[in-house]
Amino acid sequence: MTKKKVIFLSIIASILLFSLISNVQAFYVRDHLGFIIDNWDNVNGVVTNECRDRLAIVLDGESFADAGVIYYGSSDKKLLGTYIATHTRAGYVSCLEEAGQDLDKKCFCYGIGLHSVDAISHNEGGLTAKYLRNFFGSNYLGHMIVERSMENKNQIQREKNNDYAITSGKLDYYNGIFLNSLFTETGGSNKYLEMSQSISGIDMTNTAKIFRSAYIGEGFYNSVYKNKLSLPLWAYGISIGMILIGLIFLILTLVYGKTGWKWVNALFYLIIMIIGIIIIFSFITGTTWKILTFVTEVPASIGYLQVSDSDVVYYNNLGNEYTAQFLKDGILRIDDWSGLSYRDINGIWVDGSLTNAEKPFKYLTYFVLIPGFLFLTFWLMLKSFGLRLLFWRKR
């Protein structure tokens, strides 16, 4: 492959990627919101009667429950706890206790409780746990692929069924004011974030800003908020690391490569560098969520981790039933819906169903994918520089 062809194909690939990204909508928040909106006017119960005129606050409480997802894979137990806290009974009860008689705060907590519908996806027998196990999927990227596939197919199904949340326009409306209740800059109040800090001991203001800004696509370098928005250092570390590794090895390959294989090797490192640039680009332009969405849609489009039509109907019905019941009595019937393994506040080990479901993927990764990747990289380097190992030489 000639140098001109490598450059030409890389440019074409980049153009296609960004054109596709520009037409992708946001993540699977819509399924969560849809369950609540569909049942809100039809259920007379504890939650709906107390919070009838506070639907936006309830929905933002439900959405805020996932704000800690940016620390999903954190090694810092305290930061990881920001996700666990909003996915366990302990966190929900603490929220209600902190809310006291403040009805706004209480409705916000009800929203966090409604997020427990995640159980039908994360817990044993749930949608995501089922597909991860069956497809040897990762709980990081695979998790997103499954739930995005569910949302895309469910959207089509809801439109066919003249779903109320969609036909009324309420789903689009509330999706458009995502987490506005949390910030004074968007007409809300900071009391919900203050309550969250009292419960977890961690200031979630910046985290919630990142979550909101990414979802609605306003970018991380905007003037919406009074205080500067800052991304976690690991976010820059990943992107800058990929750019530097790609650039250094690209230059070494092109300068010192001796065979035609160097163009293949150069393309490999050029792709790594481009991915790093795309990540930085997404931070600046606010397209991070759209890029992630695009990445998660590709595997399902070719059948990998694609949710079946029958499962879309089954789990959508489960979600509606679960939500209607909670709106009626406000009672949690489960203790954990995170799906993760962790040690709780009492020191008891919780064995997560999602953690268990991805074990086949981990075995495949450790014993096949990583060794295979390292071998391929090493082999390409040898071929590019015209080198041979001693035991490969002809005697």
Image: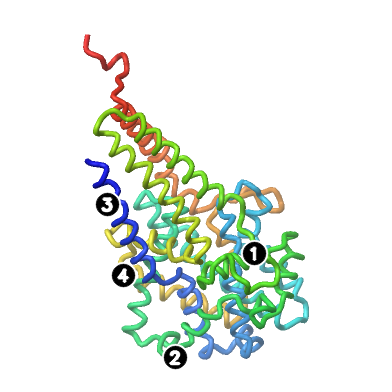
Q: Nearer the viewer, residue 36 or 218?
A: 218
The amino acid beneath tag 4 is Ser
51 sits left or right of 301 in the view: right
Say which quadrant the N terminus sits in.
top left
Q: Nearer the viewer, mark 4 or mark 1?
A: 1
Question: Which of the two marks, 3 or 4, is nearer to us in this view?
Answer: 3
In front of the other: label 1 or label 3?
3
CA distance separating discs 1 and 3: 36 Å
Q: Is residue 161 above or below residue 64?
A: below
Mark 3 sits on what residue? 9
Q: Secondary structure at mark 3?
A: helix
Question: Which numbered disc, 2 or 3, marks the residue that appears first in the sequence?
Answer: 3
Q: Secondary structure at mark 1?
A: loop
Tell me if 328 is positioned left or right of 368 in this view.
right
Mark 1 or 3, nearer chain start: 3
Q: Amino acid at mark 1?
A: Leu
Residue 310: which disc?
A: 4
* Residue 153 occupies quadrant: bottom left
Q: Residue at x 65, y 56 (%)?
A: 81
Q: What is the CA distance from the residue labelled 4 to the residue labelled 1?
A: 42 Å
Asked if residue 298 is positioned above or below residue 233 in the image, the reply reads: below
Mark 4 nearby-residue class (10 Å; few <14, some 14–19, many ≥20): few
- Counting residues from the N terminus, which is met first, the one under dot 1 or under dot 2? 2
Q: Which residue is identified by label 1?
A: 229
Label 3 amino acid? Answer: Leu
Q: Amino acid at mark 2?
A: Ser
